[in-house]
Image (cartoon, rainbow, N blue to C red):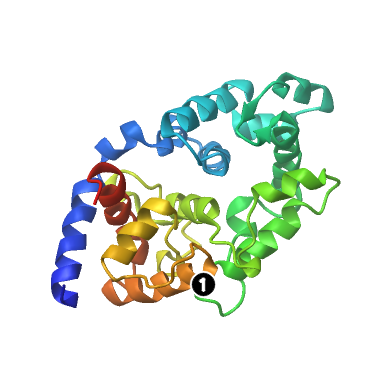
Amino acid sequence: MKKADLKEFLDEKVILYNTPEFITSDPIQIPHRFSKKEDIEIASFLTSIISWGNRTMIIRNASKMMELLDHAPHDFIINHEESDLKSLEGFVHRTFNHTDFQQFIQSLQHIYVKHGGLEQVLLIKDDSTTYQSAIHHFKSCFFEIAHQQRTQKHISDPLKNSAAKRINMFLRWMVRSNAGGVDFGLWETHSPAHLSCPLDVHSGNVARKLKLLLRKQNDWKAVAELDNTLRKLDKEDPVKYDFALFGLGVFEKF
């Protein structure tokens, strides 16, 4: 497929899937239940962190998370006492258990109190055009308080060549414009031009079939290769094509 034809094909798929109807079957429906900025970003972050596996299970367990946080995640995180964390016991999503959940609440409190919140701590502060170093910095801040070693695996580090699919998805939700009615566009200090595609089995397979990606592993090197290709199609909003790749893979079995 020629570049112009490929762009037209993908642009049509973006229009098809970047609509409010997409929300009803996607985990992004969880943060859409909130209106306060901090509630939206915390609900988005926690939902994205457990976004692997069956989507119905992800939505169910993310809903349970919000219920355990009294449907006021920011207030719970800022004002919780140690005794409040006992209410989280018994939560589990695959390998993410209540110990991890409790640690995430404490680390998020640290991020909001000491680092100005998620928007500030994930801001690109050097000349980078990707979030590779920013995500690494965020992970360092997240775990600079006392924590159990097991919990570190739930935040990927692109400097260790992880594709960081879940953090990149969270960033897409926060940074991309809400013009399509799906993403939120809350973080105006960030640029959608710097986003990377949340690379997973579905998007990776479709990208390879369309010759957007040649590398076989879904790692950060593949993310960088896909970045380079998608930015040639739209340098201002390259990650809009996540809707096309995901929709083709999940809904159309491309």
Is 85 placed above or below 6 here? above
Q: Amino acid at mark 1?
A: Lys
Q: Residues within 10 Å of mark 1 (few under 14, many from 20)?
A: some
Q: In the picture shown, does residue 55 fall above or below 133?
A: above
Percent from the top left, x then y, of residue 35?
45, 34
The location of residue 90, given as percent across then percent down, is 70, 21
Say which element carries label 1. Answer: helix
Q: Is residue 177 left or right of residue 1?
A: right
Is residue 95 left or right of 174 when viewed as pictured? right
Residue located at (43% from left, 29% from top): 33
Question: Is 223 located above or below residue 58 in the figure?
Answer: below
Query: Where residue 156 sits in the image (x, y, percent)?
Result: 63, 56
User: The N terminus appears in which quarter of the rendering?
Assistant: bottom left
Q: Is 145 placed left or right of 3 in the picture? A: right
Residue 189, given in percent of the width and then of the height, sits at 51, 62
Residues 6 and 82: in front is 6
Which residue is the site of mark 1?
221
The residue under the point 27% across, 73% down is: 233
Q: Nearer the viewer, residue 161 or 13?
A: 161
